[in-house]
């Protein structure tokens, strides 16, 4: 008789995921992805009256004896903006192992990947960050980045100033960190060494004249059709790095460029593996644009499942009873 399916709520997923333990696994997974050159498949999307219903492609990864599928509804005006379920299956038997709330897995995977790429591509002396969009995604990404490198100054900008003020309050616990809330996007980004964008924007708001030479930009909001944060002329003057080159051109930040190959330098996994270079000059503007890959969800979901089973967390149910 098969084991009961494990049901994990959002709070149980959070309790059973250690971000620090995931970094090495994610770095290895990106290198495997870059080496294997598997065909990339975009998520299936359906527009609703208030947001977007998405279904991921199959999440698979060498060394993980499971695969996953995720269905989410994304509503920008709602808090939290993402809700959904991830289904984890045994890769040999096809049996359903677990069903877990997916929003933390989605946010955590994007934030860790973004922080990893930012630390890898930003200049070695870069210590000032501008956050454009001050929701939970930005908060997680900044937290993880500060564990990877020393950050001295943070400037916050959001169209909803209250979000910036709430984040500034949360950042008070970091002793010695200079935090400022800005009412001007241009002022917020013009002197930053690192710019991290995580918004729902469907039109560009960052232009080359706003960015100083040597800046690194991570654009996590340009992750699907119609979503844009960076202008075409800024992209054309940058060195662009991505999680997957096919999807970056198909649905990501480069989807409207005529010759994306001119700026697309490498995938994150290639830079991590040392098969392609990252930043090569101090004046270079580097951009990391992530679309989001399902194996990132799988690495996190498998870890949450293993820990929850070991601790006896969650609830079991017989799916076929």
Image (cartoon, helix red, strand yellow):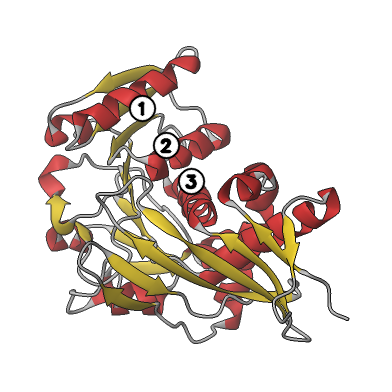
Image spot of residue 249 (x, y percent): 30, 76
Image spot of residue 262 (x, y percent): 26, 73
Q: Is residue 70 left or right of residue 261?
A: right
> Residue at the spot x=55%, y=80% of the render?
58
Question: Pointer 3: residues within 10 angstroms few (<14), some, or many (20+)?
Answer: many
Image spot of residue 65 (x, y percent): 76, 75
**Element on which disc 1 rests:** helix
> Residue at the spot x=57%, y=33% of the render?
147
Of the 4 image quadrants, the one containing the N terminus is: bottom right
40 w.r.t. 13: above or below: below
Residue beneath disc 1: 167
**Can I make out residue 276 in this image?**
yes
> Residue at the spot x=21%, y=78% of the render?
259
Question: Pointer 1: residues within 10 angstroms few (<14), some, or many (20+)?
Answer: some
Alpha-carbon distance for marks 2 and 3? 11 Å
Report if the CB atoms under discs 1 and 2 are less than 8 Å apart: yes
96 w.r.t. 155: above or below: below
Residue beneath disc 2: 139
Q: Quadrant of residue 105?
A: bottom right
48 w.r.t. 219: above or below: below
Residue beneath disc 3: 115
Mark 1 or 3 closer to N-term? 3
Given residues 285 and 84, the one toward you in this image is 84
> Residue at the spot x=44%, y=49% of the render?
121
**Element on which disc 3 rests:** helix
Alpha-carbon distance for marks 1 and 3? 18 Å
Mark 2 or 3 closer to N-term? 3
Q: Nearer the viewer, mark 2 or mark 3?
A: 2
Q: Is residue 292 left or right of residue 216?
A: right
Given residues 196 and 6, the one toward you in this image is 6
């Amino acid at each position: 008789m098969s084991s009961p399916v494990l049901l994990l709520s959002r709070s149980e997923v959070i309790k059973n995921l250690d971000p620090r333990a995931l970094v090495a696994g994610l770095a290895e997974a990106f290198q495997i992805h870059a080496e294997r050159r598997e065909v990339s498949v975009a998520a299936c999307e359906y527009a609703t009256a208030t947001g977007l219903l998405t279904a991921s492609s199959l999440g698979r990864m060498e060394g993980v004896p499971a695969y996953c599928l995720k269905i989410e509804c994304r509503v920008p005006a709602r808090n939290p903006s993402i809700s959904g379920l991830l289904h984890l299956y045994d890769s040999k038997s096809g049996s359903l192992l677990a069903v877990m709330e997916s929003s933390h897995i989605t946010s955590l995977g994007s934030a860790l990947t973004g922080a990893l790429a930012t630390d890898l591509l930003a200049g070695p002396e870069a210590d000032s960050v501008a956050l454009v969009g001050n929701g939970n995604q930005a908060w997680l990404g900044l937290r993880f980045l500060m564990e990877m490198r020393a950050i001295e100054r943070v400037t916050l900008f959001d169209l909803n100033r209250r979000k910036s003020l709430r984040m500034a309050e949360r950042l008070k616990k970091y002793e010695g960190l200079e935090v400022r809330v800005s009412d001007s996007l241009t002022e917020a980004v013009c002197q930053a060494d690192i710019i991290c964008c995580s918004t729902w924007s469907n039109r560009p708001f960052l232009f080359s004249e706003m960015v100083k030479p040597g800046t690194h930009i991570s654009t996590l909001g340009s992750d699907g059709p119609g979503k844009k944060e960076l202008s075409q002329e800024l992209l054309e003057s940058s060195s662009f790095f991505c999680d997957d080159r096919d999807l970056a051109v198909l649905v990501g930040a480069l989807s409207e460029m005529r010759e994306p190959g001119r700026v697309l330098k490498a995938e994150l996994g290639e830079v991590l593996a040392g098969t392609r270079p990252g930043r090569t000059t101090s004046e270079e503007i580097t951009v990391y644009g992530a679309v989001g890959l399902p194996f990132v969800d799988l690495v996190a979901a498998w870890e949450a499942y293993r820990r929850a089973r070991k601790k006896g967390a969650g609830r079991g149910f017989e799916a076929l009873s």
